């Protein structure tokens, strides 16, 4: 069903709601297109005309800096007209239903919605509501999915490691509440990562994670031993308030990524983090800013990957750079 | 007045009957089945070809939505749906607005039911005032007005001492306490069964233990106080086995489940389909199998509709934000029959025996 809703009759991307169920060829196509778009940002005139005359609305029901900004930039570099609407300024606070908000924005002849919402599944609901000419891109829904983040992480891994086969990847931290982790598991499994580990305390590694293709590790040292890539997840303060963890201090003691621990991984290990990072809570500054960290490259890659997904959804998988 | 109902599929679990036969009624009483009594002249003949002819079904959990949520349903609309589906008596839980914790609300419901003049409505009264779990409701007054039992609906009485006293007081008045078991904390805020699918969908989840734990707590008090307890909408095999064990030890307990729990599992949610958002949540295949077997053995004493009509908007939102519950009266008979066909139940008509008074086991 995910696949049916997301692709057209020719198997081309129509919405981008989740990585789950998409074939490896389509994910590779996203990465290949993103590769071509990376050049755009490095030129004097950082624009291609693929989405000229198209209207893109970034509809964010949850705060975001990185994701919203990079979607904004991606759309602008594709020459689209972009509008940013966030919860603080929207009428959702005045009691308007999600469906009504959407109908109103659609009535303004919007071509694409980038949606971030606190409820898992909200972009699916939206994709079912909009007309056939409108695309929906998931900018993160609840704990469910954050497909562009997963793709930009995959893009970063491919650039650094050259591919996915034979890699060991550890995702560390609050898997239970992380849409990034879920999407990343689907993406990396589909792209060929065979050893995928979900590392964290039992309160933060959800039941049934094996069914998604990740092996749970409850010990940090075992979890990152021999890994090629370590993806650290952000730990939120509210996890301490909801009895999932005793303190940030103890979390760092058990699961914080330190230079000492990093030695357990492969010598050329790559350290990633979707941001925003909590220095001294999930990751030591020396590691975050160290030579093996690609955290800032991830942000840069986010623009190219989002350009690729937007262009593909709009049916313009044309060559970048003309 | 003599009436002949002909050509219908006559189902009467009490008499182990499931056959195409005619029914003869004289002055409101059934006088014969199959062949007309001597001298019977029908003033009216009803052709029931293609229809079921059954005793009036009794539903132990029908949310009528009135008073308080008339935009979802009214006593008139839902009792009409009930009789159209074969239910002649429906029992409504006390979580209306206002809550059924005063005789005035019971009176209002009776009044509306009389006006509607279709199914008989028997309300459950609140176990505690406002369902707040603090102060006992005036159960004698509620019983006096016709409440057939008391319940705190979906609100757990968290203070175990209050729960004990409420159960003792209800027992004083020979009232059955209806419990919809749910732990107050475990799975709070959840909207689906805790399972690999809830992990996959990233939806807040409710473990099956949340039900079994509350059943265990109530059973402890039930066995200590001798209270008659009816557990409603059991969704998990573990909870059902706790109830069955307690009954074998002599506790005065019964249990029902919603027909939908015999048919659906959490996996039916698929990609966030809010039609399957219910409380308690549909659980796994093992639980569904356990409930079916319990139903077959008679450990499940009754099936109910757990009918919860909604306005369209209640289900038009992302899954988590939708309201739980589904409308079930109108599809009940199809569900029983469809379920029977799909799972090859041995005895014909068996599905209906749990809907008719006094026939909760099929020999």
Image (cartoon, coloured by chain):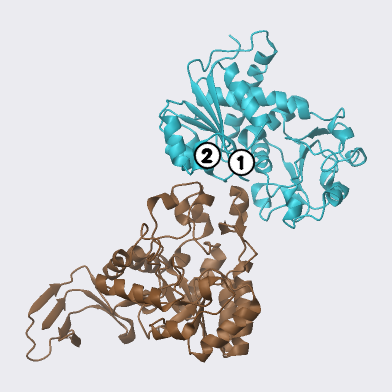
Chain colours: A cyan, B brown
- The circle on residue B31 is none
Along the horizontal axis of the image, is A194 left or right of B188? Answer: right
Q: Nearer the viewer, residue B157 or A239?
A: B157
Residue B278, position as x, y percentages in the image: 49, 60
Q: How many marks?
A: 2
Residue B100, position as x, y percentages in the image: 44, 73
- Which residue position is annotated with label 2? A123
Along the horizontal axis of the image, is B327 left or right of B265? Answer: left
Q: Which type of secondary structure does the marked residue at label 2 adopt?
A: helix
Contact between marks 1 and 2 (CB within 8 A): the answer is: yes
- Which residue position is annotated with label 1? A145
Residue A24, position as x, y percentages in the image: 60, 33
Along the horizontal axis of the image, is B137 left or right of B220? Answer: left
Q: Residue furthest right?
A: A260
- Circle 2: is it few (<14), some (14-19), or many (20+) Cα within 10 Å? many
The part of the image, by quadrant, that contains residue B7 is: bottom left
């Amino acid at each position: 069903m995910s696949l049916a809703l997301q692709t057209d009759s020719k198997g081309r991307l129509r919405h981008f709601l989740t990585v789950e169920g998409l074939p490896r060829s389509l994910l590779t196509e996203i990465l290949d297109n993103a590769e071509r778009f990376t050049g755009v940002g490095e030129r004097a005139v950082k624009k291609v005309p693929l989405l000229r005359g198209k209207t893109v609305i970034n509809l964010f029901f949850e705060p975001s800096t990185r994701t919203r900004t990079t979607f904004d930039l991606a759309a602008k570099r594709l020459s689209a007209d972009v509008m940013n609407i966030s919860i603080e300024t929207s009428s959702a606070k005045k009691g308007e239903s999600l469906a009504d908000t959407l109908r109103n924005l659609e009535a303004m002849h919007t071509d694409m919605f980038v949606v971030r919402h606190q409820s898992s599944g909200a972009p699916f609901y939206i994709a079912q509501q909009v007309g056939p000419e409108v695309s929906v891109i998931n900018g993160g829904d609840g704990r469910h999915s954050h497909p562009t983040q997963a793709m930009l992480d995959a893009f970063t891994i491919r650039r650094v490691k050259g591919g996915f086969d034979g890699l060991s990847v550890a995702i560390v931290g609050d898997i239970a509440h992380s849409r990034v982790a879920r999407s990343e598991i689907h993406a990396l499994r589909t792209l060929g990562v065979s050893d995928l580990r979900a590392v964290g305390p039992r309160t933060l590694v959800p039941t049934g994670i094996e069914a998604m293709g990740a092996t749970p590790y409850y010990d940090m040292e075992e979890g990152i031993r021999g890994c090629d890539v370590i993806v650290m997840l952000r730990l939120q303060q509210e996890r301490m308030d909801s009895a999932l963890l005793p303190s940030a201090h103890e979390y760092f003691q058990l699961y914080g990524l330190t230079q000492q621990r990093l030695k357990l991984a492969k010598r050329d290990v790559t350290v990633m983090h979707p941001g925003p990072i909590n220095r001294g809570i999930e990751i030591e500054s020396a590691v975050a800013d160290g030579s093996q960290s690609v955290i800032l490259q991830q942000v840069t890659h986010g623009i190219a990957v989002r350009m690729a997904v937007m262009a593909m959804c709009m049916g313009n998988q044309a060559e970048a750079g003309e | 007045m003599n009436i002949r109902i002909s050509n219908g599929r006559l189902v009467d679990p009490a008499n182990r009957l499931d056959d195409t036969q005619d029914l003869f009624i004289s002055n409101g009483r059934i006088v014969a089945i199959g062949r007309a009594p001597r001298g019977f002249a029908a003033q009216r003949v009803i052709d029931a070809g293609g229809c079921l002819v059954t005793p009036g079904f009794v539903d132990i959990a029908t949310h009528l939505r009135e008073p308080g949520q008339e935009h979802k349903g009214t006593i008139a609309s839902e009792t009409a749906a009930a009789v159209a589906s074969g239910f002649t008596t429906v029992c409504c839980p006390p979580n209306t607005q206002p809550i059924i914790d005063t005789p005035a609300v019971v009176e209002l419901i009776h009044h509306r039911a009389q006006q509607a003049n279709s199914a008989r409505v028997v309300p459950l009264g609140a176990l505690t005032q406002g369902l707040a779990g603090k102060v006992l409701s005036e159960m004698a007054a509620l019983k006096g007005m016709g409440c057939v039992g008391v319940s705190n609906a979906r609100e757990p009485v968290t203070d175990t001492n209050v729960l004990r006293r409420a159960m003792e007081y209800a027992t004083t008045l020979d009232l059955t306490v209806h419990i919809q078991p749910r732990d107050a904390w475990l799975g709070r805020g959840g909207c689906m069964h805790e399972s690999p699918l809830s992990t996959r969908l990233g939806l807040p989840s409710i473990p099956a233990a949340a039900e079994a734990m509350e059943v265990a707590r109530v059973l402890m008090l039930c066995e200590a106080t001798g209270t008659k307890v009816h557990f409603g909408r059991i969704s998990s095999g573990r909870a059902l086995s706790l109830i069955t064990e307690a009954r074998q030890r002599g506790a005065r307990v019964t249990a029902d489940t919603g027909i939908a729990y015999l048919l659906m599992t959490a996996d039916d949610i698929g990609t966030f389909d809010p039609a399957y958002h219910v409380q308690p949540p549909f659980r796994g295949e093992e639980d569904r199998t356990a409930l079916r077997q319990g139903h077959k053995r008679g450990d499940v004493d009754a099936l109910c509709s757990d009918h919860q009509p909604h306005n369209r908007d209640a289900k038009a939102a992302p899954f988590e934000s939708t309201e739980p519950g589904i409308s079930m009266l109108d599809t009940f008979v199809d569900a029983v029959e469809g379920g029977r066909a799909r799972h090859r139940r041995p005895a014909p008509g068996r599905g209906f025996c749990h809907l008719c008074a006094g026939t909760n086991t099929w020999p």
